[in-house]
Amino acid sequence: MKKRVLGKTGFEIVPLVFGGNVFGWTIDENRSFQILDAIVDLGLNAIDTADVYSRWVPSNQGGESETIIGKWLKANPSKRDKILIFSKVGADMGGDHKGLSKRWIIQAVEDSLRRLQIDVIDLYQSHWPDPQTSYEETLSAYDQLLKEGKIRAIGASNLNTQQLSDSLTVAKNNNLPAYQTLQPEYNLYDHEQFDENLRNLVLKENIGVITYYSLASGFLSGKYRSKDDLNQSKRGEKVASYLNKRGMNILNALDKISEKHHATQAEIALAWLMARKEVTAPIASATTIPQLKSLVHALQINLTSDDMAVLDQVSH
């Protein structure tokens, strides 16, 4: 299966990262283990999670996703070398357990390592910008963790052009490690924040881009065509925002191109992302084995220049 180098990390990843937010949220531990086994069997080699997954569930406290991944890794130690583990820090875990202070990062990484039951996290990412903490303090924490061998690379999520540029400048001026990856919200419908300036910056600095909400909360699967369909989604409010003329134009284009390629709409939407020069790999999730196989099938789709032109046009 084809692989791409993830920016300056040096990691060779299959250009599709599995989104681990579903573990302990929409699927239980037993189903999660089945999906995790299948991820490796189908040739994927990276899983993205976060300490906060899935604290938004009333009965959860955060850490559920990492905990399930950790139990699976302990039960399958030979599979650790076959999978890259990406996690994140900085989201609100309650009290003062949030943000990107050195104090919290140093504590949070130990919590994540314990839940994941591993010695090192392959890619550790700042989940959200923290205006209360300087880039120098945050990057110095990562510098310490890199030197201690507790993390292998660092990245950021949800930074805009100015924030990413400022962080790179601070890293250079203070001889600190710079962010090697960026995780933005980016899909056929939502890519305004990934503007031309941010795109140019990541290309110039060779920063790997891992997109989240790659299927627009499931909207790009094509199964939501009206408000009557929203009861199928746990993100009904978010999906409802796509039910407009532009959204329908995107779905109509996906319908035609998916039929041409004998693929699903979701597979075409992922193939479009994979074909973008600035994107290293989209993140996508599945709760069943057939859904997971469908995601993997997207890796085999080669969109033509005409296909890309049509999708580019309707996405603007």
Image (tube, rainbow, N blue to C red):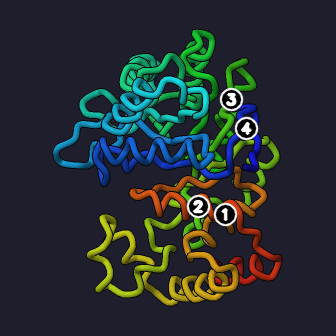
Q: Residue at x 51, y 74 (%)?
A: 220
Tell me if label 3 and label 2 are in contact, CB under 8 Å. Answer: no
First of labels 4, 1 by sequence position: 4
Please tell me whether mark 1 or mark 2 is closer to you in this view.
Answer: 1
Q: CA distance from mark 1 to mark 3?
A: 25 Å
Depth check: give the residue in front, 278 or 270.
270
- Report x, y in % for residue 245: 50, 90
In three-dimensional space, the C-alpha distance between marks 4 and 1, rounded to whole angstroms, equals: 18 Å
Q: Tell me which amino acid carries mark 2.
A: Tyr
Q: Earlier in the sequence, mark 4 or mark 3?
A: 4
Within-10-Å neighbours for mark 4: few <14, some 14–19, many 20+: some
Q: Which residue is mark 4?
A: 12
Q: Amino acid at mark 3?
A: Ala
Residue 11 x %, y %: 71, 34
Callout 1 touching callout 2 (CB < 8 Å): yes
Q: Position of residue 14 (x, y in %)?
A: 68, 47
Q: Is residue 103 visible?
A: no
Note whether 174 is above or below 264 in the view shown: above
Residue with the mark numbered 3: 178
Residue at image location 54% in from the left, 20% down from the top = 120
Sort mark 1 into few (<14), some (14-19) or many (20+) by Cα contacts within 10 Å. Answer: many
Dot 1 or dot 2, earlier in sequence? 2
Whether residue 266 is visible here, answered yes or no, is: yes
State which tag comes first along the sequence, 3 or 2.
3
Q: Position of residue 208 (x, y in %)?
A: 70, 44
